[in-house]
Amino acid sequence: MSSETLEIQLIAAVVAVACALPGVFLVLRRMAMMSDAISHAILVGIAAAAIFVTEDLTSPLLIVAAAATGVLTVSLVELLNQTRLIREDAAIGITFPALFSVGVILIARYAGDVHLDTDAVLLGELAFAPFNRFEVLEYDLGPRALWVMGVILCVNVVFIAFFYKELKLVTFDANLAATLGFSPALVHYGMMTLVSITAVGAFDAVGSILVVALMIAPPVTAYLLTNRLSRMIGLSGLIGVASAVAGYWFAHHQDASIAGSMGLMTGVFFALALLFAPNRGIVAIARRRASQRWEFAQTMLTIHLFSHEGLPEAEREAHVNHLSSHLHWEPDFAQQVVRNAERRGFIRNRSGRLNLTEQGREMAQLALVK
């Protein structure tokens, strides 16, 4: 494995974890669209700073300008939402296309001869990231993108660790947080600033589309796998790294876009979790519903037998052949319910005559009380 290959995967992994950490709180607060808005709107800050302030595309002023644009985007969305004339999703849909369009116009008009073009903005190019080196006193310290995202990752980890309780409280119950003396608005804008800085750092290497994919897909996938916030944060980072590495090798074998392949892998992992998550997956839900159907049928059977127990019609009502007409069950379904109930010890089947066991009688009485 060449050093460039290793560096590309390392950069992508660090970007994935850095994006996934704040993305967890965006997902839990149902603000996934905000990441899309910020990752696109910061373009106008980058373009304006690069064109009118500094011509150096590696200048830290670009990060400052882009982060400020991200906060501006959040503020504009909040202002529009507070008017109560339009919904939050509509406010986002109005704000970020307008800012993003201004950025595209600035690039097309003033920066047509530099590599900051719309293709780089949307898709990025991780293959070139290792060639942009970070040198100090003529010592090569590695890819610049790795250092930038490494610092941002550390900032994210420190911020989330330091304000974990506040973030958890504001995320799940903002009213309680305000009652206890916390400022939900301050925590909100702090997190949005963090999202903006993360999006800016990842912007040059992976493009805005992959920023959104890595910020939302891994947390959503982790959300399907666990109910604990701390575990969700850890799983988000792991899923992001797995998506980045798997996407790189898929692109390598298929000679495809690296960023596009990584975005595809985030969708693949999400689809797998959507299907096979232990509690929230489609397969688990289907099995649970099927199990509930059989449980309900067995309960109805015990109630039916209990309600006719000791009555003159009990002989007829308790016969297995009578269940189809009385309970409106298909014969095959009725036979299966009887077998399941007998296996679990709720009834005894004597040549088609069904009798409740003590366990089945208790089940029927409990169901009737409920």
Image: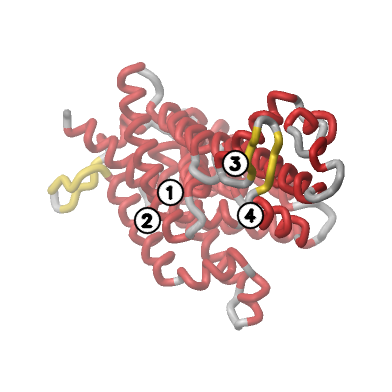
Q: Is residue 109 left or right of residue 146?
A: right
Q: Are marks 2 and 3 in contact (CB under 8 Å)?
A: no
**Crowding at label 2, few (<14), some or many (≥20) Cα neighbours within 10 Å?**
many
Sequence-wise, the earlier of marks 2 and 4 is 2
Residue 368 image point, x, y percent: 77, 57
State the residue at coordinates (61%, 57%). Answer: 29
| Label 4 vs 1, first from the N-terminus | 1
Mark 2 / mark 3, whichever is N-terminal = 2
Residue 129 vs residue 232, the one in the foreground: 232
370 displayed left or right of 294? right
Residue on which the image places disc 4: 358
Q: Which residue is mark 3?
A: 288
Residue topped by disc 2: 152
Foreground tag (4 vs 3)? 4
- Mark 4, other Cα within 10 Å: few <14 / some 14–19 / many ≥20: few
Q: Are marks 2 and 4 in contact (CB under 8 Å)?
A: no
Q: Which labelled disc corresponds to residue 236?
A: 1
Query: Which numbered circle lies on residue 58?
Result: none
Circles 4, 1 touching at the beta carbon (< 8 Å)? no
In the rendered image of this protein, does residue 252 appear above or below residue 13? above
Give the spatial CA distance, label 4 vs label 1.
49 Å
Return the x and y of residue 253 as percentages of the image width and height.
31, 18
